[in-house]
Amino acid sequence: MDTELAEILQVLIAPFHPQQSLEDLIVEVNRLYHEFEAAGYDISHPEIRTQLTPMWQEMLGVATNRLGTQSQKVLDFGCGTGFATQQLLSAVSSESINRIICYDLSPTMIEYAQASLKTTHVPINFISDKTKLFCEPQEFNLLLTNSVLHHLPEKVQFLQQLESILSPDAVWINGHEPSKRFYINPESAVVYDSYLRYKRRQRLVPRIINRFRKKLGLEAMISDVHKRSAAYQTAVRSHEIGLFAKQPSTNSIVRLVDVWVPHTPADATRGLGFDYIEMQKQLKGKWELVWVRTYSFMGSTYEEKLPPQWKKKAQMLAQKYPLDGGNFCAVWQRTY
């Protein structure tokens, strides 16, 4: 586990008293969280399907061109509810697919993926035990990930773990990850800080309303919504099973789940987030970047939900800095 990440989390999560190694803690908290979040994941992330579907269709076109006439042996790593595989099946002829393995550490996520993919005629195996991936008889030549890297304590080093089961010319579709380029762009940072201040002002009214609710004895309704959240349930359960010496805050859980997600320029300066240029350097001689696109020019906020004045500012940033969005998608090909 890299000490830099440990130092970052010590700053962001206080008090931080794990009962085991930080790397194992992140994995276990993610497993618990996604068990609780599985049922509502697609509803709570509408931007995944509306925003990413066109990009996935384009990326799959790049990937299939790179693979040529090869029969596709697909690993959907961190499959969640099955979004990436759904995109593949809608874009690629089933005759060109040899097999698909959907892996996720959450058994409940696997159940939802099975339900969403049950009508396909392509053979799909669903796995929640990572060790079983290494028992596969053939190498995968198409690796799919979507909104996965920022949950992994080892960041892009997970590719090294998969080397033995990927073909020498494998293509990796790397979908929907947080880019720190947005937060370290000086002009974007100023606009985003203004937006955050605007949001804080907007929250004043709900706070006042909540005070009246409390006086009227309705605070239990607010508390109940909070207690049903995946983060709260994870905090309670992680303490019950001994991952923490005392129950962590929901904010600490969110930080451990979205471990590499920056929320502010300070987070990006500390090292959170990804930069595809830095990734190119890290993966040089092993993977080649063949396609990239950045989007979300108001940080992690889905632009369609922005008020008109802020949507206009986001569009301005997109025109001036098209490579510095708050999220990115990329396609890579293995070179060794």
Image (tube, rainbow, N blue to C red):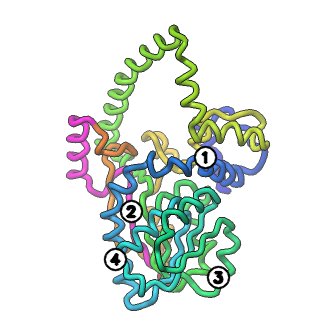
Which secondary structure lies at badge 1?
helix
Q: Name the residue under label 1.
A: 36
**Could you give the CA–CA distance between mark 4 and mark 2, rounded to whole angstroms?**
12 Å
Q: Which residue is drawn at 30% across and 57% down?
A: 323
Q: Residue at x 42, y 58 (%)?
A: 176
Is residue 271 visible in this depiction of the protein?
no
**Could you give the CA–CA distance between mark 4 and mark 3, rounded to whole angstroms?**
26 Å
Q: Dot 1: within a 10 Å radius of its alpha carbon, few (fewer than 14), some, or many (20 or more) residues? A: many
Which label sits in the foreground, 1 or 2?
A: 1
**Could you give the CA–CA distance between mark 2 and mark 3, rounded to whole angstroms?**
28 Å
Where's residue 148, x and y in %? 52, 59
Q: Do the residues labelled 1 and 2 touch (CB within 8 Å)?
A: no
Q: Which comes sooner in the sequence, label 1 or label 4? A: 1
Tell me the magenta residue range.
307-334
Specify the amino acid type for callout 2. Answer: Cys
**Could you give the CA–CA distance between mark 3 and mark 1, rounded to whole angstroms?**
29 Å
Q: Which comes sooner in the sequence, label 1 or label 2? A: 1
Q: Which comes sooner in the sequence, label 4 or label 2? A: 4
Q: Name the residue under label 4.
A: 62
Q: Which comes sooner in the sequence, label 4 or label 3? A: 4
Specify the amino acid type for callout 4. Answer: Val
**Could you give the CA–CA distance between mark 1 and mark 2, rounded to whole angstroms?**
27 Å
Above or below, comparing residue 236 to residue 26 in the picture: above
Image quarter of residue 23: bottom right
